[in-house]
Image: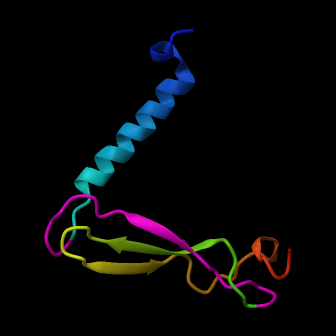
Amino acid sequence: MRAHLNPTRMGAVAEASADLTRRVQARCPTCTFPSWTPRLLAGRPCAWCNGPTVEAWIEEYVCEACGNRAEHRIEPGRKGDPGHCDYCNP
């Protein structure tokens, strides 16, 4: 089957196009530079030992043009799964 007619590939291309459109439309609130999109940071505290897990818990926004930064916690107060903790589940 040709790549441009493959339904799976067409879906992936549509998702990539939508992501690119969202990135270009998201602008820094300070300088309006495009690409104000989050980067996920791992380290949600473990429910058993309170150490860092590999689960994302912070969305960090950084403007490449002006250096403006913003952080948003994902589900604040929720503890991480001990199965994703390097100490509790080595």
Residue 30 position, x and y percent, is: 16, 75
Quarter location, residue 16: top left
* Residue found at x 31% / y 79%: 69
Q: Is residue 55 left or right of residue 15?
A: right
Q: Which residues are magenta?
A: 29-49
Marker count (numbered): 0
* Residue found at x 35% / y 62%: 37
The residue most toward the top is 1
Does 35 appear in magenta?
A: yes
The residue most toward the left is 31
Q: Quadrant of the C terminus?
A: bottom right
Task: Tell me which colouring the rendered structure shows.
Answer: rainbow
Work out whether 1 lies above or below 86: above
Q: Is residue 26 left or right of residue 3?
A: left
Q: Is residue 81 left or right of residue 41?
A: right
Residue 78 position, x and y percent, is: 65, 82
Q: Quadrant of the N terminus?
A: top right
Nearer to the camera, 42 or 57: 42
The residue most toward the bottom is 50
Residue 83 position, x and y percent, is: 82, 71
Quarter location, residue 42: bottom right
Q: Main secondary structure of the magenta part?
A: loop
* Residue found at x 62% / y 79%: 43
* Residue found at x 80% / y 77%: 82
Does 3 appear in magenta?
A: no
Work out whether 71 lies above or below 7: below
Q: Is residue 19 left or right of residue 47?
A: left
